């Protein structure tokens, strides 16, 4: 009887281990400086009377005057919006509060969009004459922000690739393709650098009010009442708005 012996031989068998991928991750930002072409004004009309009805009537009268003068300055109605109304009872100062309201506060906010910056000072001066009590906002914006956002993003990606290339060169490596891209959300509120909240104005006296939005530029508006010889002061340049983008990109590297 014949017997057969089977011998299994594994010749030249090897296990291939995948080489660990070499990568480099960098972050970079791109920024575009743009001259704003739109300004948003926040005009507040505040009245306080013992009677709620009287407070409303007084506020309505001033608000109508403001809307009329905006039309006189050729501001389109589409650029004017009444966007806030606040009514609250006033019970007196702390420590002397009454059980029933001493008076009523009535506030109406009017937003105005302008593309002609030369109109800012005349409108505000006439508005104070008409009874405006507060300027809550003067914010400069860029109407074509999306286009500039694209440019900022392009610069950010270019800077990231340049940085990654330089680092890999210093390490004696070669830069490969991008493997992953992340964009950090940027809040480009058109003119955040120019946002300001002016204090309430005393409307019973002649005064030059100076509005300083942070440290970038200075705006001076003149409220003229009794002094007809007062010299009007022009508005300074609104400066520029920064529109930025930031990206994080992972690139592959090779020896």
Image (cartoon, rainbow, N blue to C red):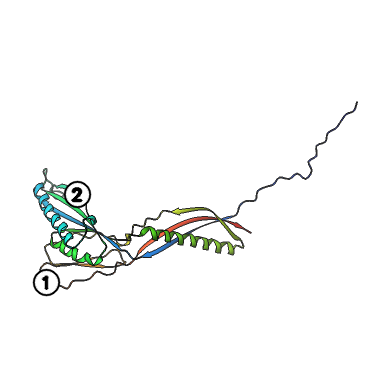
Which is more toward the observer, 20 or 231?
231
Q: Please state the horizontal and vertical placement of residue 193, each as a whole percent of the image.
A: 32, 62
Asked whether disc 2 touches disc 1, contact meaning CB atoms under 8 Å apart, the reply is no
Residue at 12 percent of width and 74 percent of height: 229
From the image, tell me which residue sits under label 1.
228
- Packing grade of label 2 (10 A; few <14, some 14-19, many >=20) is few
Q: Please state the horizontal and vertical placement of residue 66, each as a whole percent of the image.
A: 15, 58
Q: Indicate left or right for 177 with 210 as reference.
A: right
Q: Which mark is residue 120?
A: none
Q: Earlier in the sequence, mark 2 or mark 1?
A: 2
- Packing grade of label 1 (10 A; few <14, some 14-19, many >=20) is few
Quadrant where the image shows the C terminus: bottom right
- Whole-Å distance between the Cαs marked 2 and 1? 35 Å
Element type at mark 1: loop
Element type at mark 2: strand
* 104 up-or-down from 125: above or below: above
* 140 up-or-down from 185: above or below: below
Q: Please state the horizontal and vertical placement of residue 27, each as a whole percent of the image.
A: 48, 58
Can you tell which quarter of the image residue 226 is in? bottom left
State whether residue 135 appears in this view: yes
Q: Please state the horizontal and vertical placement of residue 15, each as a whole percent of the image.
A: 71, 45
Quadrant where the image shows the N terminus: top right
Residue at 13 percent of width and 55 percent of height: 64
Q: Residue furthest top?
A: 1
Residue at 17 percent of width and 59 percent of height: 71
From the image, tell me which residue sits under label 2.
85
């Amino acid at each position: 009887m014949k017997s057969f012996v089977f011998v299994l031989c594994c010749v030249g068998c090897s296990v291939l281990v995948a080489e660990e991928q070499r990568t480099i991750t960098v972050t970079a930002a791109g920024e575009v400086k743009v001259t704003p072409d739109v300004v948003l004004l926040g005009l507040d009309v505040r009245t306080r009377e013992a009677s709620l009805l009287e407070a409303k009537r007084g506020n309505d009268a001033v608000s109508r005057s403001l809307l009329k003068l905006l039309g006189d300055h050729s501001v389109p109605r589409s650029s004017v919006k009444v966007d806030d109304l606040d009514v609250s009872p006033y019970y007196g100062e702390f420590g002397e509060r009454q059980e029933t309201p001493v008076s009523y506060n009535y506030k109406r906010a009017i937003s105005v969009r302008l593309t002609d910056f030369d109109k800012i000072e005349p409108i505000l001066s006439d508005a104070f004459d008409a009874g405006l009590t507060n300027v809550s906002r003067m914010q400069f914006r860029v109407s074509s922000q999306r286009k500039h956002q694209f440019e900022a993003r392009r610069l950010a990606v270019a800077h990231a690739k340049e940085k990654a290339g330089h680092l890999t060169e210093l390490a004696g490596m070669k830069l490969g393709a991008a493997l992953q891209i992340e964009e950090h959300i940027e809040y480009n509120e058109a003119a955040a650098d120019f946002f300001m909240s002016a204090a309430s104005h005393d409307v019973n006296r002649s005064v030059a009010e100076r509005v300083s939005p942070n440290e970038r530029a200075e705006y001076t508006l003149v409220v003229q009442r009794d002094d007809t010889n007062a010299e009007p002061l022009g508005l300074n340049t609104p400066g520029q708005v920064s529109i930025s983008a930031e990206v994080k990109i992972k690139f592959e590297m090779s020896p």
